[in-house]
Amino acid sequence: MADQSATADALTAQLACSVCRTRLPLLDDSPTVRCRACGAEFARGRYVLDLTPPERFRARSGLWEAWDRIQANGMAGYLADPERNLSIGQRDDCSAFRRFSRCRGLVLDVGCGPQAWPAYFDRSPLVRYVGIDPLADLNPSEFLKFAGLGEFLPFASGGFDHVLFATTLDHFVDPDTVLTEAVRVLKSDGEIDVWLGEKDPAAPGPARSPEWYQRLEQPALADDLFHIKRMNDGDVQALVERAGLTVVDRERHQVDQYRANCFYRLRVAP
């Protein structure tokens, strides 16, 4: 099992209010944590501290309402069919991304999911993982994680050696802000590793969907049941450029005629 206490020690100076970036106490055992600067309060759940910004600090929009529905759809898939909807078990695609990302040091996984240990994580003692996900409190985990949003990363600037997006970059309301936040919390010599699951819009649907899937509702502003906007390689390239990043390595793993797993290694542009 991963040593959560060692990771917590390494993160002590990095944890910050997701609203104003003021340092927060990590090891305080009170039921809530209050930012001394802006007054935002964060509650402890069953397993993790929830660092989602309180509603009064966030501008709501139709996209966020769509995102709420998409999160509920994701939850349904995680509970009904975790093997197909979470990165667990012995999976070739997860192993390929683990090899590609070659993580070392302190690693932030943005959108880590509710599983105990993502299958693309490395068991090496040279790696310490921190995860953030809206559904992080669903289950206990073998690594340190928090509930929160990619648009509001609750960490000080410049603390992580790697930031991971494992099939998550196309799940955010504002991916530009998310990538900018990733750059902010990254060390100057750090790397951002992205796994994009690319799907041709012409891909045929399954002949028959399971009952739980048939009950899901697609929001009007979403591309499908699980994405506000599905991305392709061109979308990622445009995001990277706007964030002041450059692609230093990439791999494409074709799954079938319509699907591919695309890996990107990003660094701050010189």
Image (cartoon, rainbow, N blue to C red):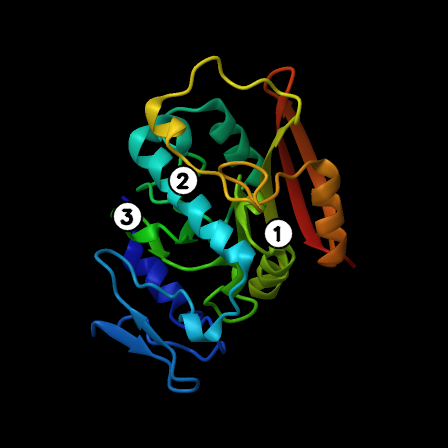
* Amino acid carrying mark 3 in the image: Leu
- Report the side of 242 relative to 111 (left or right): right
Residue at image location 42% in from the left, 70% down from the top: 55
Whole-percent x and y of residue 252? Answer: 66, 28
Q: Which residue is mark 2?
A: 73
Q: Give the distance between the C-alpha atoms of the residues marked 2 and 1, in whole angstroms.
A: 31 Å
* Upstream in sequence: badge 2 or badge 3: 2
Residue furthest to the top: 207
Identify the image quadrant of residue 232. Answer: top right
The label on residue 138 is 3
Q: Position of residue 134 (x, y in %)?
A: 39, 54
Give the residue type that dot 1 points to.
Glu
In this rendering, position of residue 27 left or right of residue 188: left
Q: Is residue 17 left or right of residue 182?
A: left
Counting the numbered discs, the total is: 3
Residue holding disc 1: 191
Residue 24 against residue 45 in the figure, above or below: below
